[in-house]
Image: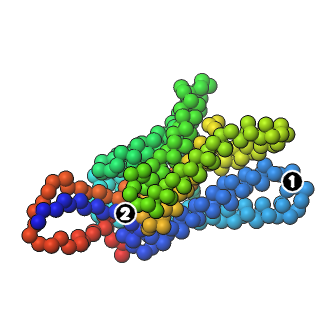
Amino acid sequence: MTIETAVKTVGRADEQGLLFDTAAKFLLWAAFFELVLYRLVSRLGMHLSKLAAKYESVRITFKVLSSMGFTLLNLVSMLVFLVLTLALLNKVRGIGSGRYDALVVPASSGLLLLTVGFLIFPPAMLGAVVYNVVFWAILLLLVAEYLSIPRPWSQRIMIVVYLLGISGWLYYQVVSTTYGLAGSLEAPPLVHEINRAGEAFMVLASLLVFWAYGGFSLRSKNKRQQRRNIAFALTAAASFVLLLFVDTLAGWYDPAVALEVRKAGEGIGWIFQMGMGYTFYLPFALYMAGLLAWSYTVVKLYTQGRYEGIGLGLMFLAGYALQLSHLTLMVLLGVLLLTLERRRTSGTSTRTDEPVLAGEQHPLLGQQA
């Protein structure tokens, strides 16, 4: 009997052990609420300081939400340390399964130790440069490992675009801090242009996530899937067009309404800039389209129990401006989770005289005790 064999080992959230799986899921939810309650709501309270001063209930509400957000910040920091440590331990147990594990494991462990040291002794400008350079190097290794495995081109393009986006921020941070350390008063070369280009790449990456992992295909023969794809595409297209021209439409309706819409947009932009680093210099519709595409994909993968759902969630919840160490570690962990998927394909025909049984699936990075 001649058969075509294609063995696929998928990084599902049941292969790294119960502690890892539970902590990773809690981390994703905690990171989401930390973003909302700490990085966004606390900034919103600053934006509405006059209203909070006028109404005591508003002040108390924002104070309680900010306190909850700060608690979540500490919780996320501890969880990201725990999950990243478990992932590295699993890599140690399965050393050699990844082409770059011999470099990734010690470098990531060193970054964790460096993070702990900087929490005890806050770094100066030189320490910040070293930290970002080490993280940048590890990120390049993880992306190289990701690309070394046979994958669809959509996933390859997505991770490269994401790397370009984060690299824009890292270049801005490293070069600006280095110039300040050297006492130079000159503006670093192309620092602002590269920073803005990095933001554009991040928005593009959030759109490409849907193409790479969302399962959207016009070639699907499943009628139910076709209806879902068409409904999602029409909803997304209508929302994009509406947001793209909302200012013009509001101006036609009432100039006063258009002015309020612009003020609201500026306020939202300020909040997200302070919380996630996005300046919103691109059309607002692009950011919302990226948010919609990313949200759909993460929810879909998460409900399927796949590590990619948690990884993609952490990568984009960290935002563009990695101003806190736990956000840097979230990006590192997110890309690491994406590399847990392994594809082994055999393009040649094999002949066997025995019935093909369900192949035994071995955890890629070792089974967590």
How far is mark 2 from mark 1, CA to CA?
48 Å
Local packing at callout 1 (Cα closer than 10 Å; few below 14, some 14-19, many 20+) is few
- The answer to whether residue 69 is visible is yes
Q: Quadrant of residue 17?
A: bottom left
> Given the image, on which type of amino acid does mark 1 rest?
Leu
- Badge 1 is on which residue? 51
* Lateral position of residue 258 relative to residue 321, left or right: right
Question: Nearest the camera: 160 or 104?
Answer: 160
- Badge 2 is on which residue? 11
Report the residue at 74% width, 39% height from top.
249
> Disc 2 or disc 1, which is closer to the eye?
2
- Residue farthest toward the front in the current orientation of the protein: 223
Q: Which quarter of the image is occupied by the C terminus? A: bottom left
User: Please, is residue 273 above or below residue 35 in the view?
Assistant: above
Q: Locate residue 277, reporting x and y percent.
A: 62, 44
* Numbered disc 2: secondary structure: loop
Q: Which quarter of the image is occupied by the N terminus? A: bottom left
Report the residue at 55% width, 43% height from top.
203
Local packing at callout 2 (Cα closer than 10 Å; few below 14, some 14-19, many 20+) is many
User: Please, is residue 153 above or below residue 116 in the view?
Assistant: above
> Given the image, on which type of amino acid does mark 2 rest?
Gly
Q: Quadrant of residue 260?
A: top right
Q: Locate residue 312, reporting x and y percent.
A: 48, 55
